[in-house]
Image (cartoon, rainbow, N blue to C red):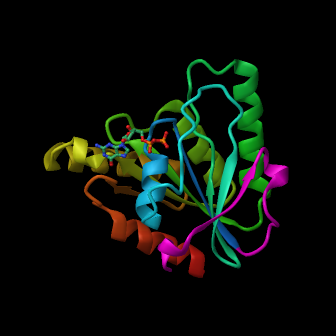
């Protein structure tokens, strides 16, 4: 798939407003600041494609991008802002788990985690929900350029081992938007998901 062909489709305020549930879609999720926008921009080679909303607590939109008539990328709002009220957090968690369970076209989810802070509670919750929904899961350890090769490999091994406990189709890789490390691997995984 030529990810450069991605074009902006819609901004949805909630899952009910998403495009028709047909074809195949892949979602990107992660804590705020995990590097999700950067990764989407790197994948699509479009610097302005995904923009971060740096305003914590504000209503965040689900941005959708089209790769072809029946292939979509979904940019889910970042989670984990400390200042967001509990009620808002709980509402979003419910909506997210519902999306994972009910969305027929959703094939897999890329969960981005800063390689220096992997597997926080909310990340683990999300992995659980995704596995329970029979989704393919790719854990993307972002900003891998921040670690030297030794520590990078160590975290990769630790997270890979931890990922087995989720008992699902979970794979782990390192990634850097800065150096493009792991970009080919990411593309190959997404190609697999979109083709099956
Ligand atoms: P988002 O909130 O998950 O969309 O995260 P962003 O993509 O906006 O990135 C958050 C911060 O991390 C920004 O300051 C980025 O410049 C930085 N960042 C993102 N990806 C990388 C990376 O691969 N390497 C480094 N060193 N910094 C990164």
Q: Residue at x 60, y 38 (%)?
A: 125
- Residue 174: percent from left, percent from top: 32, 54
Name above or below for residue 130 compared with residue 67. above
Name above or below for residue 168 compared with residue 115. below
> Magenta residues, as a range?
1-23
How many numbered marks, from 0 up?
A: 0
As for residue 7 lying within the magenta part, the answer is: yes
Q: Residue at x 83, y 53 (%)?
A: 17
- Residue 188: percent from left, percent from top: 42, 74
Name above or below for residue 171 compared with residue 82. below
Q: Residue furthest front?
A: 48
Q: Nearer the viewer, residue 116 or 47?
A: 47
Q: Which image quarter: residue 143? A: top left
The reply to whether residue 171 is in sight is no
| 92 with respect to 1 (left or right) | right
Q: Nearer the viewer, residue 137 or 42?
A: 42
The reply to whether residue 70 is in sight is yes
- Residue 78: percent from left, percent from top: 57, 39
Q: Residue at x 23, y 47 (%)?
A: 145
Query: Which quarter holds ligand 1?
Result: top left
Name above or below for residue 66 compared with residue 109. below
| 174 with respect to 53 (left or right) | left
């Amino acid at each position: 798939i030529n990810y450069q062909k991605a074009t902006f489709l819609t901004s949805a305020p909630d899952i009910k407003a998403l495009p028709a549930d047909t074809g195949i879609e892949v979602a990107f999720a992660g804590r705020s600041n995990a590097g999700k926008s950067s990764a989407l921009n790197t994948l699509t080679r479009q610097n302005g494609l995904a923009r971060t909303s740096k305003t914590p607590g504000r209503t965040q939109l689900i941005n959708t991008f089209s790769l072809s008539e029946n292939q979509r990328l979904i940019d889910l709002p970042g989670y984990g802002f400390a200042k967001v009220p509990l009620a808002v957090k709980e509402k979003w968690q419910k909506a997210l788990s519902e999306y994972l369970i009910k969305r027929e076209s959703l094939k897999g989810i890329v969960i981005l985690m800063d390689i220096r802070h992997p597997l926080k509670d909310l990340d683990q919750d999300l992995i659980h929900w995704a596995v329970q929904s029979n989704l393919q899961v790719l854990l993307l350890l972002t900003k891998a350029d921040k670690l030297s090769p030794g520590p990078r490999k160590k975290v990769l091994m630790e997270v890979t081992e931890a990922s087995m406990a989720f008992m699902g189709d979970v794979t782990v890789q390192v990634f850097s938007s800065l150096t493009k490390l792991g970009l080919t691997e990411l593309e190959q995984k997404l190609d697999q998901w979109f083709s099956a």
